[in-house]
Amino acid sequence: MKNIIGSLALALVVLAGCKVSKDVATPKDAQPETFRNAVTTGDTSSIADLQWKNFFTDAALQKLIDSAIVRNYDMQVAVKNIEASELQFKQVKWNYAPTLGLNVTASTNRPSDNSINGLSIKQYGIGTKHIEDYNANLALSWEADIWGKIRSQNREALAQYLQTNEAKRAIQTNIVSSVSQGYYNLLMLDEQLNIAKKNVKLNDSTLRIIKLQYDAGQVTLLGVQQAQAQLEAAAQLVPQFERDINVQENGLSILAGRLPNAIERNVTLNDISFPETLSTGVPSAMVSRRPDVRSSELALNIANARVGIAKAQLYPSLTITGQGGLNSFKSSNWFNIPASLFGTVAGGIAQPLLQHKQLRTQYEVAKVDREKTVIQFRQSVLNAVGEVSDALVRLQKLKEQQAIAANRVKTLQQATSNASMLFKNGLATYLEVITAQGNVLQGELELASIKMAQLSANAELYRSLGGGWK
């Protein structure tokens, strides 16, 4: 027996360093050197390296995001997934340990008188026609990890555990982005509501003047009706914006894991600003920072591990077993030590034969799945780079739009003021006043929309670069 164990130990030493499959590395050519539309500054840092509280500095928004991260139900599910995955990962670590079981059995057997056992009973004069057997033993079994199968299982479990962490981070980045964009939309609606109310007052003032002129016979009833319609068109916007504000507040409350309620805000849309230029860093750094891309990279680790497991199944397995305990044909002698002690040790090598084709197919399928994972990784990087480029071009063009829209609103406001003065002095018609007031209303509403879109684009750039989970 010593020779057998020695031979098996020697085999372990020789084969333990064997690696049956070669891993596929993460493609290094999947990302470009720079982002399209990025301003080249030579700075390799990125806004995504900032903690979200340092990027979103408004106190009310920070409070809202904090609540969402803690209380959002998707986030809570992600945390539970991490807990479950951690337990599974800890369990897999025990795959290296042998299995150990306690067996306690008691049996009686009444053999046929014409059987060998029955004749033996008669021959030896045991004095009974049945055979009793009492057994208590510890059974141990251990499979040597010659081909790295257990190592691959551990690698797979680790990557799966890390994936659940990345899933949590991905949810958090989306929550931070969604809450901030919803908050900015709420500020825009506040601004648009104020614009509508201000325009209602302006139109009401114009209507009173036109009514006075109508009473004096200077204008027709048509002028009064058109001014009245213009006033009602502006007034109609007030309940519309109030409705949208309530709906947005409800959406933000639910996102934050709270019952629908009012949302605190102490600033206006124009009080929020970001730096003119936001550093993006380099794409290669984003790949290791974005949770979804990182998850795709971990998926490749899982695929490599599964190929290793499938390949190891094709090779012989070495198992060492041992058993020892107490055995007796009489219950009275069961615990008579050392007479009832017994022990066995065995080692065996098993090679699958009839299942070889099935195992080979599983191995080939695992390799195909790994190739699919590489493609999916490339696609995830491509999507991520595309999202960053989209956010950059939106910021650039919205900045140009904002400058044009601001000048247009300034011109329209001056035109409205001039039209009102000329109208009061009889040098302009009521149609010119009504047209000017309608144009300034639309211009101011559009400017507020562009301002909100700029803030949302900043938040989207931060998310697309992988920021928000720190």
Image: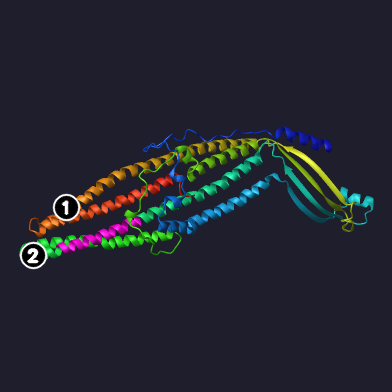
Q: Is residue 381 visible?
A: yes
Disc 2 + disc 1, Cβ < 8 Å = no
| Label 2 secondary element | helix
Point out the stretch of residues depicted in magenta: 185-206
Q: On screen, 470 above or below 19?
A: below
Q: Which disc is residue 469 wearing? A: none
Rendering colour mode: rainbow
Q: On screen, 165 above or below 43?
A: below
**Residue type at tag 2:** Tyr
Residue 281 percent location from the top left of the image: 44, 39
The residue that appears at 64% across and 49% down in the rendered structure is 90
**Residue type at tag 1:** Ala
Q: On screen, 146 above or below 172?
A: above
Q: Is residue 203 left or right of residue 55?
A: left
| Label 1 secondary element | helix
Q: Which disc is residue 415 wearing? A: 1
Of pointers 2 and 1, the one earlier in the residue sequence:
2
Q: Nearer the viewer, mark 2 or mark 1?
A: 1
Front in this rendered view, residue 79 or 391: 391
Residue 199 included in the magenta stretch of the image:
yes
Q: Is residue 280 left or right of residue 201?
A: right
Residue 185 percent location from the top left of the image: 35, 55
Front in this rendered view, residue 156 or 177: 177
Q: Is residue 114 visible?
A: no
Quadrant of residue 387 within the rendered picture = top left
